[in-house]
Amino acid sequence: MCLHGVSVVAEVLSKLDAPDLRVYLVWVPVLADDSPAAARRAAAQVLDPRVAQFWDDGLRLGLELARELGIPGRPSVQEGRAIAWDVYLVYPAGPRAGPSAPPKPAVWLHQLSHLPDGFAPRLTGDGLEARLRAVTRP
């Protein structure tokens, strides 16, 4: 499990006084040691009432988001399948698309080493905080 990303999320949430903010963490089994137990251990770092956490055992959301965001596969991971993992999507408040496909985010950040510079912003605490503040301001 990627612990850097979850620690960034926890740190940013501790700085934001935004009670209407909702955060959904979806854990996916991409690497060999990813498991529900590992996800539970990592999830314990983000104990915030605004956060709901899920386990995507079949990679359904990860595969669909990769398609939607244009994320290419990584040859050394999951037999080269294109999977969105270590991505952080920001949506403004409001209606969402139907259940058939995830909506496009307003912006997204990532920690994927196989994406070229400029593909999407890399995850940083300051970057995530700025983007969340932009969508949570009244």
Image (tube, rainbow, N blue to C red):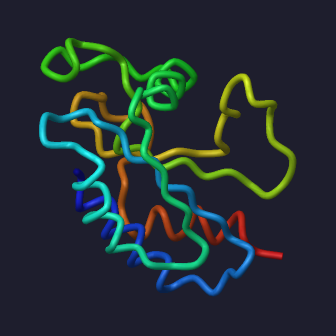
Q: Determine whether, in the image, residue 61 is placed left or right of residue 126.
A: right
Q: Vertically, is 121 above or below 13?
A: above
Give residue 120's position: percent from left, percent from top.
44, 38
To which quarter of the image does residue 121 belong?
top left
Which residue does the image show at 42% across and 45% down from the upper left? 55
Which residue does the image show at 29% across and 36% down from the upper left? 29
Q: Nearer the viewer, residue 114 or 80?
A: 80
To which quarter of the image does residue 11 belong?
bottom left
Quarter containing the C terminus = bottom right
Q: Nearer the viewer, residue 73 or 124?
A: 73
Which residue does the image show at 66% across and 32% down from the upper left? 102
Give residue 126's position: percent from left, percent from top.
42, 70
Q: Determine whether, in the image, residue 51 is placed left or right of residue 138.
A: left
Give residue 135's position: percent from left, percent from top.
71, 63
Q: Determine whether, in the image, residue 93 is placed left or right of residue 81.
A: right
Which residue does the image show at 31% across and 61% down from the upper left? 40
In the current view of this chain or complex, which residue is farthest to the front?
37
Q: Vertically, is 100 above or below 136?
A: above
Q: Nearer the viewer, residue 98 or 135?
A: 98
Total numbered circles? 0
Q: Nearer the viewer, residue 117 or 86?
A: 86
Give residue 92's position: percent from left, percent from top.
75, 55
